[in-house]
Image: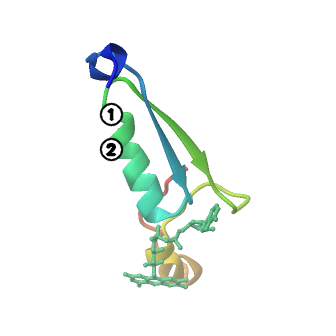
């Protein structure tokens, strides 16, 4: 392991594949860590959304938490 890998100010690059609920929550937590760079690859043409409350949303109730 080289010196830069041990340095506390080294940038860590995290790649997340999939921009769903779990991926989004992971990115939220990882983004709060100093020195972490994040790249997300998602196949959906929209940002992550709360699928769990999708039925409520279409029933006209609150969609709950929005990620966008
Ligand atoms: C209509 C509906 C109602 C639901 N209701 C409930 C409920 O009431 N309660 C409950 O607990 N759960 C419910 N669920 C299930 C809940 O939505 C899932 O458990 C939850 O979405 C799982 O989150 P996830 O991030 O693991 O996966 P996902 O939300 O499936 O996200 C994975 C993401 O990764 C992307 N992806 C996959 N492979 C690749 C790739 N190779 N490259 C790039 N991107 C990729 C996908 O396109 C997707 O955007 C419901 C689901 C649906 C569809």
* Label 2: how many Cα within 10 Å (few below 14, some 14–19, many 20+): few
Give 60 or 64, whichever is nearer the viewer.
64
Residue, far right: 45
Across the whole image, how many numbered discs are drawn on residues? 2
Give 56 or 14, whichever is nearer the viewer.
14
| Residue in the picture at 52% in, 63% down | 20
| Residue in the picture at 34% in, 22% down | 5
* Label 1: how many Cα within 10 Å (few below 14, some 14–19, many 20+): few
Residue 44's image quarter? bottom right
Q: In which quarter of the image is the N terminus?
A: top left
- Labelled pair 1, 2 in contact (Cβ < 8 Å): yes
Report x, y in % for residue 54.
Answer: 52, 77
Report x, y in % for residue 12.
Answer: 41, 30
Query: Is 8 located above or below residue 60 in the figure?
Result: above
Report x, y in % for residue 63.
Answer: 48, 69
Q: Is mark 2 on a helix, strand or loop?
A: helix
The residue that label 1 is drawn on is: 32
Query: Is 21 located above or below residue 55 in the figure?
Result: above
| Residue in the picture at 39% in, 36% down | 31
Give 26 or 3, whichever is nearer the viewer.
3
| Residue in the picture at 34% in, 19% down | 2
Report x, y in % for residue 64.
Answer: 42, 66
Does the beta carbon at disc 2 come under 8 Å from ligand 1? no
The residue that label 2 is drawn on is: 29
CA–CA distance between discs 1 and 2?
5 Å
Query: Is 64 located above or below residue 30 in the figure?
Result: below
């Amino acid at each position: 392991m080289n010196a830069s890998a041990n340095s506390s100010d080294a940038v860590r690059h995290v790649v997340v594949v999939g921009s769903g609920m779990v991926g989004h929550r992971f990115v939220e937590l990882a983004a709060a860590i100093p020195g972490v760079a994040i790249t997300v690859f998602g196949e959906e043409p929209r940002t992550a959304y709360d699928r769990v409350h999708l039925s409520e949303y279409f029933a006209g109730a609150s969609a709950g938490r929005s990620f966008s």
